[in-house]
Image (tube, rainbow, N blue to C red):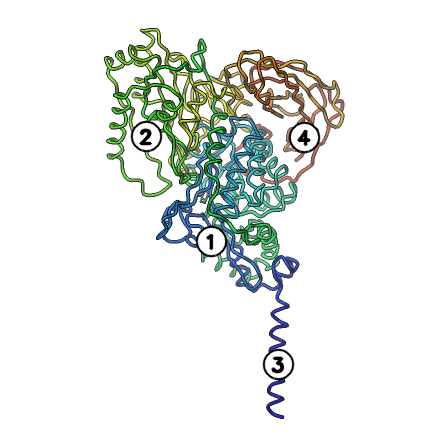
Amino acid sequence: MKVKKGLGIVLSLLSTVSFAQKAIPQLGKSPVKEVIAAMTLDEKLNIIRGTGMSASAGTGPVAGSISGKVQGAAGSTYAIPRLGIPSIILADGPAGLRIDSTRANDPKRYYATAFPIGTALASSWNTELVKKVGKAMGNEVREYGVDILLAPGMNIQRNPLCGRNFEYYSEDPVVTGNIAAAMVAGIQSNGVGTSIKHFAVNNQESNRNNVNAVVSQRALREIYLKGFEIAVKKAAPWTVMSSYNKINGTYASENGDLLSSILKKEWGYKGFVMTDWFAGRNYAAQVKAENDMLMPGRKSEYRQIKEAIDNKVLSEAVLDRNIERILNIILKSPAFKQYKYTNQPNLKEHAAVTREAAAEGMVLLKNENNTLPLKTGKIALLGNASYDLFVGGTGSGEVYKAYSVSLLDGLRRAGFQTDKKLSDGYKTYIAEEKLKQPKRTNILQTLKPVTEKTLSGEELTALAQNSDLALITIGRNAGEGSDREVEGQYYFNTEELNLIEKTSKAFHAVGKKVVVVLNIDGLVDIAHWRNSVDAILIAWLPGQEAGNSIADILCGKVNPSGHLAATIPINYSDVPSAKSFPGVPAERPDSAVYNEGVYVGYRYYNTFNVQPAYEFGYGLSYTNFTISDIKANSTFAKGMTVTVNVKNIGKVPGKEVVQLYLSAPAKTMDKPERELKAFAKTKLLQPGEIQKITFALNANDLASFDSKRSAWIAEAGKYTIKIGNSSRNIQQTKTFNLNQELVVEKVNNVLAPQSYISEAKSNQ
Ligand code: BGC
């Protein structure tokens, strides 16, 4: 009897246990809210933070490495196996997947493709192409077992000195937003996520963790948030990364106005927000502000947030709200779906994608007397970068690629001859100089380029006699953590200027031409030496196929079709933010006051009649195009369709970038003289071929942000559509009327600057 009773108790206990086990909610099988309700506080405090970075990373704020599933990824999230919640892996970054290429006791290599930098991709103005790059990049993300790529970077290029401009797209929010949306769509088409970053106003690296960006509400809405708004609404990125800096006094990651009111409520964003690595100070404030995930994860966050809950400063319901967003994304991840990744993405196929994309982003600035494309012949290849190209930036955007193609190799493969003695001399010089450089100890370090090799007058004269043309490549690199200098980085240094001047003198003396290729991360001075040379091509940091991509353009295999996505001024001092960048005090700015308001880039140059060296939207081709037959209604009702015809009137096939600007009435608010509202890239048009381009304008495109009314307002009056192939070369115009003012959208009155900006400027 006793035995029977004992057995009964055991059996009933067992059934309780199995009943209890069955009852534990599982992610994917039970409603997310039930999964959250089953979490302990400890689990909640863990899942809202990353799992930390391994000590071996040792690279300051940039995540160098996490160990485990994907070595070298930037972070991972906390797994709760009892609730069916896996850990997901996050890795950088904009120009390709950054993971370690080698692993201990493993002969296999885990290379990723180094794609062109963001600025290069944006300069293609080709959203289909960018999508294709994203698709290839996202495939590597998925096949290496990563769930979310920490990309794209999409801050506005407010000033050419920002050290991370290379990761960003443009000075204009419409280019930025549409290129970012294409990139997000491409990456996410693989079933992996993105993190658009750095939200928001992270336009400099100087004191990036603490600087207070003081910006008018109008400039925020129209310039600094607009690109993010476009990307969020068009492409629904899985995650958003908040930025390090403060905006009008509050850290972005602690800023509920930014993350809750604008991003989540106004824009209807459904994904989750993560901090940038180690960002912000007040973790409970981050959680409250709907910064859902704290990265890369620190013990102090756990302690501080628990304390806030114990002291009833923060309610557990707030944690639950954030966790729901995180779980909804985890549900979509390859990790959750137990995707069997191969560790073998098709790198060969992706090399072809990067080669094509890099070439299409290159911008031909000058081409006197059809210097380019080059005919076959012997090239005097000068400039260190011709032998040692920079293919990508440093910092979290650095990619561990299998190889990179030098310009020398690219040109040789394309059938050009070069001077062996010259190339041997350069190679030896560069190798020797590099040995003298300090060793790079972490990925935040960007080593200075090797000083240009000096060639004597006799050497140059001999080269001029023995070659058909001189090609000089000037290189610049930049990375995360610091901004660039005006002298020596923006402006060329003496050795570089000497090389250009002396080469031009020697070659022009014997009737031979000089081409300059700019292998640059961001804008440099061109106005002060451009008259000495015959052709100038911006190749940017073109990714691992660099030499092939450049050769494709130089020899005409690819007709250049890149256009500038930022203005190149005549002098650095012309830049509207020159006086206020990077803020005060300059060495370590506490604040950066955006006095120029909405007049960023071409909005400033065009409105205030400041002549640039090369305007926004500018780029040459080996052929010519006409834009004609504009058609649009003369009155704006709900929306409007605008069409033009683009014709290739030259002798070779080519693509054109068609840009639609709008000049709006400025009776109640002052307005930029014109603003880009839409753009399109033609297909490859054969000589004589015509393509009809159709643009759609809606009420949003007519509106400016009136801070006094906290609303997007389209003023009544006359609007002028201006269509061209640059912001200054307008070929078609058409006016239309808006009969009555439209209050297009009323929004929250948030993010007002507390100080610094004068009343007069607060509505600019
Ligand atoms: C960078 C981010 C990057 C993160 C992780 C930070 O230093 O600002 O862009 O995604 O590190 O590596």
Residue neighbourhood size for the residue with mark 4, other residues' Cα within 10 Å, grouped as few (<14), some (14–19), many (≥20): some
Whether the residue under disc 1 has CB within 8 Å of ligand 1: no
Picture quarter containing residue 32?
bottom right
Tag nearer the camera, 1 or 3: 3
Identify the residue under disc 1: 297
Quadrant of image for the C terminus: top right
The foreground one among 331 and 322 is 331
In the image, ligand 1 is in what quadrant? top left
* Disc number placed over residue 700 in the picture, else none: 4
Pair 3/4: label in front: 3
- Labels 2, 3: front one: 3
Q: Could you tell me which secondary element the residue under label 4 belongs to?
A: helix
Q: Find residue 607 and report its image quarter.
A: top right
Give the CA distance from mark 1 to mark 2: 35 Å
Q: What residue is disc 2 on?
A: 449
- Identity, as a three-letter code, of the amino acid under mark 4: Asn
**Other residues around mark 2 within 10 Å, as few (<14) / some (14–19) / many (≥20):** some
Residue 121 horizontal side relative to residue 26, left or right? left
User: In the image, what residue occupies the spot 69% across and 35% down?
Assistant: 745
| Tally of marks | 4
Which class describes the residues within 10 Å of circle 3: few (<14), some (14-19), or many (20+)? Answer: few
Dot 2 or dot 4, earlier in sequence: 2
Q: Where residue 506 sits in the image (x, y, percent)?
A: 30, 10
- Name the quadrant containing residue 684: top right
Q: Tell which circle, 1 or 2, labels the residue nearer the N-terminal end.
A: 1
Residue occupying image coordinates x 58% and y 16%: 686
